[in-house]
Amino acid sequence: MNPIAHLKEQIDREGLWITALQLERNQYLKVQGSMDTNLYWVAEGSLRIFVVEENEEHTIRFGYTHNFITALDSFLDEKPSDLYIQALKKTTVKVIDKATFMNFMKSTPENNTTWQLMLEQLVLQQMERERDILTVSPLERYKRVLKRSPQLFQEIPNKYIASYLRMTPETLSRIKKS
């Protein structure tokens, strides 16, 4: 079984979710300058994490159904973050606070190992994305993301995918047509 799905089932069994939130399309789960130490399970829908620099949005990450999402910097260091988290369509998330989650993760060696695996996967994904952005052509970025995350192209509007890939929507459109 997928360790993330297994972890979610354990949290369900223990009744550790503090609430569920319904977000409408374009509604913010987190805004720039706020601190957020919650972890969210996307029960349905999709979200994006982005930052605004010089009035331009830069998409950093996506979260979709059956995945966890958080503003990781704020979650880890418990400080305000420049990140936004926005629903891209009607979305339902389950919420667990950091203290409850971390106590649960430390409660067994298996949970602790799962937490380590989650962090390792996240770091590796971020490193791969950075390498893609810095070293490969837009066409190669597109191909690599399509191979890694085909679900992305089913769930996320092209303008946000283009932002994530650091290209214009027109460039993405041309690449997809070729």
Image: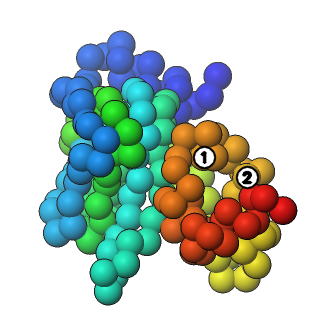
Image quadrant of residue 33? bottom left
Q: Amino acid at mark 1?
A: Leu
Q: Residue at x 59, y 52 (%)?
A: 121
- Which of marks 2 and 1 precedes in the sequence? 2
Q: Amino acid at mark 2?
A: Leu
Q: Secondary structure at mark 1?
A: helix
Q: Residue furthest right?
A: 178
Q: Is residue 45 visible?
A: yes
Q: Which residue is mark 1?
A: 152
Contact? badges 1 and 2 (CB < 8 Å): yes
Counting from the top left corner in percent of width and height, residue 35 is at: 17, 60
Counting from the top left corner in percent of width and height, residue 30 is at: 23, 54
* Left or right position of 8 against 87: right
Q: Residue furthest bottom?
A: 54
- Check the image and report above or below for 115 versus 52: above
Circle 1 residues within 10 Å: few <14, some 14–19, many ≥20 = some
Circle 2 residues within 10 Å: few <14, some 14–19, many ≥20 = few
Depth check: give the residue in front, 97 or 22.
Answer: 22
Position of the N terminus by quadrant: top right
Q: Which residue is mark 2?
A: 146
Q: Is residue 113 visible?
A: no
Image quadrant of residue 79? bottom left
